[in-house]
Image: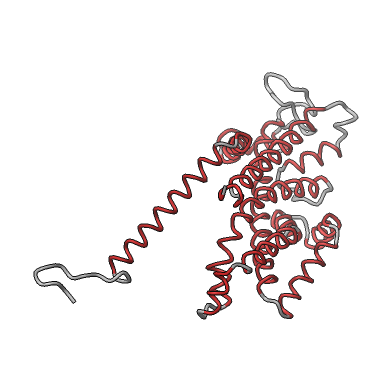
C-alpha cells in the first residue's frame, strides 16, 4: 500500500532492502580487504618475501627483452667453456660457453611456471578431496579418505620418479607429476577444517532449511576453508619448485627447456665441482633458495594475517 500523496513504502525484502543489503556486503568486503592489506603490510618478512617474488617475476617476464633467446643456443655461444665471471659475462659461462646470467633469467620462467601450475593442480585436488571426505560420511567419504592415506604412505620422490619415467620427459609431465603427487597434505588440512566448520550451528540450520550438499559445501564450507588453502598455497609453491629442481637434477626434466634444476644437473654432469666452476652451481642454487624462502615468508605472513584467533582478539 502507498500513503496518500507520498511515495510507496518498500518492504525490507523489496528492492530498496536488496540494494541496502548489497551495499552493506560491499562495504564489509572493502573493510575486510583493508584489514587484510594492513595486516599483511605489518608483517615485514612477508613484504620482503613478496618483493623478492616480484623481482623474479619481472625478470621472468622480461627475459626475452633482457637476453636474446639466441644466447641459449649452443651453436651461437661466444664464450669459452666454464669461463669465470668477468666484465663480459657477469656470472661466467656454462660448459658450452653460454652466459650463466641469461640461463638463470630464462630458467626463472620455467621454474616459476612449474611451481605455480603444479600448485594449482595440487590445491584444486586437495580442496575437493578434503571437503568431500569430511562432508560425506558414508562409503564415498571413506573411499576418499583411503585414497588420501594411500598417497600419504607412498614416498613422494620415488612415486614422482616412476611417473616421470613412464610419462616421458616434458614440461607438462613435470607439472602433472608434481601436482598429482603433492595434494594429500592439503586434503588433510582441508578435511580437518571442514569437520570444524560443519560442527557449527549455522550448518545445522542450513540442513534444516533444506540446503543440499552442494549448497552447504560451496556457500558455507568453502569460504571458511579458503583462508587456510590460500596460506598453504604459498608453501606448496615452494615445495613444487624444489620438486622440479630435484627431478630436473636427476635428469627427468625437459631437456629442451632451461630451468634452474636442469642447470644444476648440467653443472654436476660436466664436472663443475671438480673444475672449480663455483659460479655455475652457485647462481641457480641461490635463485632456488631465494624463491623458496620468499614463498615461505609470504606463506607464514598469510597464516598470521588470516588466523581467526588473531582477527577475533
Q: What's the residue at 21%, 70% (across, down)? A: 9
Residue farthest right in this picture: 274
In this rendered view, identify the residue nearer to me: 66 or 117: 117
In-image side of 256 versus 298 (left or right)? right
x and y percent of residue 254 in the render?
Answer: 74, 50
Residue farthest top in this picture: 87
- Give the percent coordinates (x, y) of residue 47: 58, 36
Confirm whether residue 16 shows in the render: yes
**Quadrant of the rendered image containing residue 84:** top right
Q: Quadrant of the N terminus?
A: bottom left
Query: How many numbered markers are drawn?
Result: 0
Q: Residue furthest left?
A: 5
Residue at 61% x, 53% y: name it.
Answer: 230
Q: Residue at x 77, y 43 (%)?
A: 262
Residue 302 image offset from top left, x and y in percent? 61, 46
Up-down relation of residue 229 to residue 290 (above or below): below
Q: Nearer the viewer, residue 295 or 278?
A: 295
* 116 to 39, vertically: above or below: below
Tell me if I can see residue 64 in this picture. Answer: no
Residue 305 in the image: state x and y as whole percent. Answer: 59, 45
Q: How is the image coloured?
A: secondary structure
Q: Is residue 30 left or right of residue 288?
A: left
In the foreground, 136 or 167 = 136
Q: Is residue 30 left or right of residue 116?
A: left
Q: Quadrant of residue 223?
A: bottom right
Instruction: Tell me which residue sits at (52%, 68%) in the image.
Output: 219
Amino acid at each position: 500500500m502507498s500513503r496518500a500523496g507520498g511515495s510507496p513504502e518498500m518492504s525490507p525484502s523489496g528492492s530498496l532492502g536488496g540494494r541496502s543489503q548489497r551495499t552493506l556486503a560491499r562495504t564489509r568486503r572493502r573493510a575486510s580487504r583493508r584489514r587484510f592489506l594492513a595486516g599483511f603490510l605489518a608483517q615485514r618478512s612477508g613484504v620482503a618475501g613478496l618483493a623478492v617474488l616480484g623481482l623474479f617475476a619481472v625478470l621472468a617476464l622480461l627475459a626475452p627483452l633482457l637476453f636474446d633467446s639466441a644466447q641459449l643456443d649452443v651453436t651461437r655461444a661466444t664464450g669459452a667453456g666454464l669461463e669465470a665471471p668477468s666484465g663480459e659475462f657477469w656470472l661466467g659461462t656454462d660448459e658450452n660457453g653460454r652466459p650463466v646470467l641469461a640461463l638463470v633469467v630464462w630458467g626463472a620462467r620455467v621454474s616459476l611456471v612449474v611451481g605455480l601450475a603444479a600448485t594449482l593442480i595440487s590445491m584444486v585436488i586437495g580442496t575437493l578431496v578434503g571437503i568431500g571426505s569430511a562432508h560425506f560420511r558414508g562409503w564415498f567419504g571413506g573411499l576418499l579418505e583411503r585414497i588420501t592415506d594411500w598417497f600419504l604412505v607412498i614416498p613422494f620422490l620415488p612415486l614422482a620418479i616412476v611417473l616421470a619415467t613412464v610419462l616421458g620427459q616434458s614440461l607438462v609431465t613435470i607439472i602433472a607429476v608434481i601436482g598429482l603427487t603433492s595434494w594429500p597434505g592439503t586434503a588433510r588440512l582441508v578435511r580437518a577444517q571442514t569437520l570444524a566448520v560443519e560442527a557449527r550451528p549455522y550448518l545445522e540450520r542450513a540442513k534444516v532449511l533444506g540446503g543440499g550438499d552442494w549448497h552447504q559445501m560451496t556457500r558455507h564450507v568453502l569460504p571458511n576453508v579458503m583462508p587456510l588453502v590460500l596460506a598453504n598455497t604459498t608453501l606448496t609453491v615452494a615445495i613444487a619448485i624444489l620438486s622440479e629442481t630435484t627431478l630436473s637434477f636427476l635428469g627427468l626434466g625437459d631437456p629442451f627447456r632451461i630451468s634452474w634444476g636442469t642447470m644444476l644437473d648440467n653443472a654436476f654432469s660436466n664436472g663443475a665441482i671438480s673444475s672449480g666452476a663455483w659460479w655455475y652451481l652457485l647462481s641457480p642454487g641461490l635463485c632456488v633458495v631465494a624463491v623458496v624462502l620468499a614463498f615461505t615468508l609470504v606463506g607464514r605472513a598469510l597464516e598470521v594475517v588470516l588466523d581467526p584467533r588473531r582477527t577475533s582478539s
